[in-house]
Structure formats: C-alpha cells, structure tokens
Image: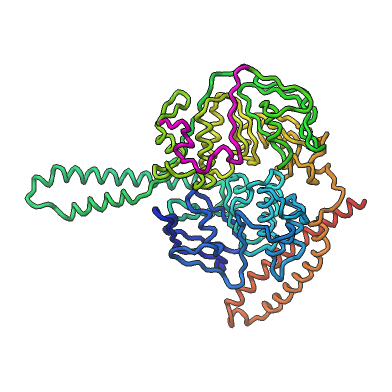
C-alpha cells in the first residue's frame, strides 16, 4: 500500500518581473526517495527548492508537509558571525531527538576542525559548515542545492557514501553528473516553468529528455504546417468569397497565439575558441621544481614536460597547491628551486574560478567586448556582439545588465565568452564547471576536445575530467605529484584505488601512502575514526531498541481479527515492521563490520 508523500508542491507559480519563472511546477517527495532536480541555469531550480523548504512563498499553488516530518535545507550563503566555533553553528541545526555527536562526525568527514573559530573561514569552509549544519540532524527530507561546490574529490566521495547509507528522502541539485548518477532514483526536470518527472535515475535522464524535445519539435513542425495552410487559404480563398469565414479566421489567430505561447526549448551555448598560431612542439619543460609556503611543501622535485595538444588534469584536495603549480608552470610564480623553460610564442589564457576578472559595474556587452566594438572575431569567424552573446544563452534584454546582477552560472558563461574570444594556444581552466548547467558542461567538454592547443585543467568533477584530459597529475601529499596517462577513472585503475576512495588527500586515512599504490585491502588504518567509535558504542543499544519495537508490532499483528477490524492499521503495521527489520539488519551489518575492524586493529 503506497504511503502519502512527505512533501508536496502542487501547481506552483512565481513571477519575478517579466516572464514567469514558475508556471505549473509540482514536486512530490516520498520517504526514502532520492530525486535529482535538473534544468538549465536560471530555470528556477533553486527557487523551487526554497519554496519546498518554506523559505520563499509562491504567488500561487500549494505546499504541504506531513505532520511531524522534518526538513533541512542547505543554505547557499550562511551567516556564521554569531557563533564562536563551527561546531556551535552546526549544533543549532539539531533537534531534541538528534544525536549530539553527529555534528562532529559530519565535520570530520568534510575535513573541518569543529573547534575552529568562524571569523577566519574561507568561502569554501563556510560552505562546508553549512553542509554539516544540514546533514547533522538526519532529517526526513534533505534539500541540497549544489552540495559539491567547494568540495574536493575525496570529500565528494565521502558525501556520496554518507547519502547512500541514509534511508531518508533527498532532493538534489548538482552539476556533478557522476554524483547525480550515483545517488538519484528519480529525476524532476524543470523546463520553461513546468516540471516533468521520470521514475528512473539520472543515468537515463538525457535519453528521456531528448525524446520529449523531439516530440515537441515534431508538434511544432505540425503546427507551423497548419499555420502555413491557413495563411494560404486566407491569401487566396477569402478574395473569392463575398463573406469571410470568420470561424476559420479565428482558428488561424488561435494557432498563431498558440505558436507564440510555446516557449521554445532553450538552446545550447554555441562555443568556439579563438586559436592562436601554433606554438612549438614542447611548450613547457620543468625540471626539479621545488616550492614551499611556511614550511609546507607544495611541489617537491617535480619534472614535467608539457607538449602541444596535451590536456592535463590537476587533481588533489583543496589547498594542496594545484593553482600554485600551474602559476609556476606558466612563469607567473617563481619556484624555490628548479627551472622552467618555455617554447616559442606562448599565448596562455586563464579562466579564473573566483570571477576576479569581472567588474560587477560593467555591462554584459562591455564585459564581452571591452573595446566597445560591435564585432568579435573568434578563430576564422567574425560575429556581431549581440549574436555572440546569444551563443552563450543571453537574451537581448540582458545586454546592458551589470555583471554584478547576473547569477553565478551567468557570470561563468561571461568568463567563458571572454576567454574563448581571445587568441590562445594554452587554455588554463581553474574549476570551470562551477555554476554551469549540465548541457553547457557537455558543450564545454566538446569544445575543449576540439581545441587546437594545450589545456591545463583544475577540476573536482570526475566525469568532466574523464571526458576532457589525456593526462592526470595527482597531488600525493608532502609536495609529491604523480603523473598518470588517461582520465580520472584511468588513474584510479592504475593506482588500484576504488572509485569511491579519496584521492590525493594526505589527511584522510584512506589515501594511499606517498610512495606506494596499495590495493584497498592492503591499506590498514591506525585507529578508528570518531564516527566509527561512536557507531560501535551506540549501535548495540539501537539494535536492542529496534528488536523491541519489532516484537511489539509483531504482537499486535498476531491479532487474527486486526485486518477485519482495521485494515488501514494492519497495512501501516505491516509497512512499519518491514522498515524496522531492514533498519535492524543494516545496523547489525554495520556493527559487525566495525567490530571486525576493531579486532583487526587491536591484533
């Protein structure tokens, strides 16, 4: 017997100024469902999630939460100034029945010090603290908007495991394709203000979406043909009659209005890169590089040759020095030791992840064409500025909009447009995937593949790395960098690491040792983590409580007259006892795993 959804949004409408953002949007979240909410940048995904959280009120429509159900929302820009430490902030998200130790466990997994003061946190650390605030209570419904932003690959893998282990409902917005494929069991597509739902995981979404778009295009062609036929009749048929067929005229007007009302599927960004003349075969030759800051080694005895056409991905945890290494290789920063030699006629261009190259007061048109010219030359093609902006999905109404008023995804597209319009033979992309929608990411990957130059890419997006790079350079810790041919998955195979294992993070216990690449079974922890010790101590009591609940429900179900007297109560008890049995089995399996690990470490 199907249970009612925990959270329901029905016929949601919301308008900000001109075109309605949401017109007929709906969302149903059942217990244990993991829903990927997808759509283009600016389609209203974040707004719909805020409506689901009760933060934004729609113009019309209905929001319903089951009584007693709990919901938590990942805040985009939390204010931590009122809290002395990160843990103090995270504790405010816990309810009376929540585990008081949960905050420290989550913070440990995200690589944050619970006792760290909030006054000196970076933007990425603040974002991770907000994620811990949402995760710690283990709510019935968890609403996550881009949770992988500012997380390194190790933290993303840890978060995947945590969310997979939980049996609560999840609604997820993310540009990380692999993250969505791993976690989602259903997809809600928000397109032109309306929602459509697919009861399968994200891996099958694009084929499903393309089928819908193809059907829409066929219907549009049919409608265009019908309009053409009616116009033909109007042009030649009416003059031969004394009376106009007003019903047919009204039909033509209705068809035209229907055609105008159809908001076409938003196009894909049309990206081209302005390639400079070819450089020499060897672009960068680095030998014996050394660099340290405050006694911490960033690069230690690294030799690397960058050839024309190479696509090198730089992988490692936040703060390990990926951007620093690229600046050394480009000659923007001097090494402490070693040499860097350059080929002839290098023309690098850098796409900065911090958007520092954009003046927030500058208009969109001026940001794309600083000279003020109406023409932009990209490669061998000259385009009008307006047409070029349309290629990057900007409307004519936005051309004079200040850059500071654009969304994060739109600012990312502005930077891409500026970078691709300049001549270059080395393209440096530092976290280019942040804030881009999945369709634009697909096209960006294709453009990089077609680029007649060299690419240096810093990214935590595993799927994007697999689709773009030919070599992966991994920070192993202690300043050591290892080079692996192929993409991210190829690198994992060569290292003998499982796909969900952290890579390149010396602080996390599962990271491979600096001079070896052992199989996961060969790795041995020196101690249990805080979370593992906590689970080992609390799981026996939890198992005992679950067994007591199961016994009580079994006793009530033993009543032979229960179904006849109260079939709804019988169905509810049957569902509940199945859930409790599944939960008990999972708890027993987890406890047994930890007990075996404890014995192994003790021995």
Residue 404 is at least partly visible in this image:
yes
Picture coordinates of residue 259, whole percent (x, y): 31, 48
Q: Position of residue 293 (x, y in %)?
A: 78, 36
In depth, the one of 243 and 407 nearer the eye is: 407
Q: Residue furthest left?
A: 242
Does residue 112 appear left or right of residue 9 in this picture? right
- Image quarter of residue 4: bottom right
Q: Which residues are magenta?
A: 344-373
Q: Is residue 358 magenta?
A: yes
Q: Residue at x 62, y 17 (%)?
A: 344
| Above or below, 508 relative to 308 | below
Residue at 51% from the left image edge and 56% from the top image edge: 47
Label count reads 0
Examine the rendered structure and indicate whether residue 441 appears above or below residue 334: below
Q: Residue at x 20, y 44 (%)?
A: 231
The spot of residue 527 in percent (x, y) is 86, 51
- Asked whether residue 169 is in view, the answer is no
Q: Main secondary structure of the magenta part?
A: loop
Q: In which quadrant of the rendered image does the N terminus lie?
A: bottom right
Q: Is residue 600 magenta?
A: no
Q: Residue 346 versus residue 97: which sits nearer the camera?
A: 346
In the displayed structure, does residue 6 sit left or right of residue 482? Answer: left
The image quadrant that residue 82 belongs to is: bottom right
Position of 15 compared to 299: left or right?
A: left
Instruction: Identify the coloring.
Output: rainbow
Task: Report the residue that reaches farthest toward the right.
Answer: 603
Residue 191, relative to residue 503: is it above or below? below
> Can you give x and y, in whole percent of width and height, for residue 193 in the image?
43, 54
């Amino acid at each position: 017997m199907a249970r009612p959804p925990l959270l329901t949004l029905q016929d949601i409408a919301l308008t900000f100024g001109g075109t309605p953002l949401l017109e007929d949007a709906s969302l149903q979240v059942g217990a244990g469902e993991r829903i990927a909410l997808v759509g283009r940048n600016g389609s209203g995904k974040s707004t719909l999630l805020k409506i689901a959280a009760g933060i934004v009120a729609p113009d019309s429509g209905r929001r319903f939460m089951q009584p007693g159900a709990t919901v938590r929302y990942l805040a985009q820009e939390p204010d931590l100034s009122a809290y002395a430490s990160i843990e103090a902030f995270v504790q405010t998200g816990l309810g009376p029945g929540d585990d008081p130790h949960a905050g420290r466990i989550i913070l440990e997994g995200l690589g944050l010090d619970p006792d760290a003061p909030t006054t000196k946190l970076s933007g990425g650390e603040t974002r991770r603290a907000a994620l811990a605030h949402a995760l710690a209570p283990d709510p019935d419904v968890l609403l996550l908007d881009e949770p992988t932003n500012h997380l390194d690959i190790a933290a993303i893998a840890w978060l995947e495991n945590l969310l997979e282990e939980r049996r609560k409902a999840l609604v997820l917005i993310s540009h990380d394709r692999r993250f969505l494929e791993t976690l989602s069991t259903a997809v809600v597509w928000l397109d032109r203000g309306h929602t459509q739902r697919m009861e399968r995981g994200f891996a099958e979404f694009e084929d499903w979406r393309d089928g819908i778009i193809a059907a829409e295009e066929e219907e549009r062609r049919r409608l265009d043909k019908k309009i053409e036929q009616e116009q033909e009749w109007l042009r030649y048929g009416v003059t031969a009659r004394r009376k106009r067929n007003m019903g047919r005229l009204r039909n033509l007007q209705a068809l035209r209005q229907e055609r105008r009302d159809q908001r076409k599927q938003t196009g894909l960004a049309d990206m081209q890169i302005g390639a400079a003349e070819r450089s020499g075969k060897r672009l960068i030759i680095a030998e014996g590089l050394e660099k340290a800051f405050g006694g911490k080694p960033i690069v230690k005895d690294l030799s690397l040759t960058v050839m024309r056409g190479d696509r090198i991905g730089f992988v490692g945890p936040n703060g390990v020095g990926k951007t620093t290494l690229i600046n050394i290789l480009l000659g923007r920063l001097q090494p402490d030791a070693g040499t860097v030699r350059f080929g002839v006629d290098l023309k690098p261009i850098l796409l900065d992840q911090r958007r520092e190259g954009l003046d927030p007061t500058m208009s969109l048109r001026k940001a794309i064409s600083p000279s003020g010219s109406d023409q932009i030359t990209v490669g061998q093609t000259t385009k009008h500025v307006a047409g070029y902006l349309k290629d990057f999905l900007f409307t004519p109404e936005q051309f004079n909009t200040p850059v500071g008023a654009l969304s994060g995804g739109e600012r990312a597209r502005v930077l891409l447009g500026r970078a691709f319009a300049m001549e270059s033979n080395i393209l440096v992309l530092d976290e280019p995937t942040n804030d881009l929608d999945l369709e634009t990411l697909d096209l960006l990957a294709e453009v990089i593949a077609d680029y007649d130059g060299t690419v240096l890419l810093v990214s935590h997006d595993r799927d994007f790395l697999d689709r773009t790079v030919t070599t992966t350079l991994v920070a192993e810790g202690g300043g050591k960098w290892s080079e692996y041919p192929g993409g991210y998955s190829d690198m994992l195979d060569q290292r003998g690491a499982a796909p969900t294992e952290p890579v390149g993070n010396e602080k996390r216990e599962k990271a491979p040792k600096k001079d070896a690449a052992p199989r996961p079974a060969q790795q041995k922890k020196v101690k249990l983590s805080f979370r593992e010790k906590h689970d080992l101590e609390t799981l026996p009591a939890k198992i005992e409580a679950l067994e007591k609940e199961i016994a009580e429900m079994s006793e009530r179900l033993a009543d032979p007259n229960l179904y006849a007297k109260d079939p709804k109560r019988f169905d509810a008890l049957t569902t509940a006892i199945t859930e409790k049995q599944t939960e008990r089995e999972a708890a027993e399996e987890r406890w047994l795993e930890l007990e075996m690990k404890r014995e192994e470490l003790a021995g």
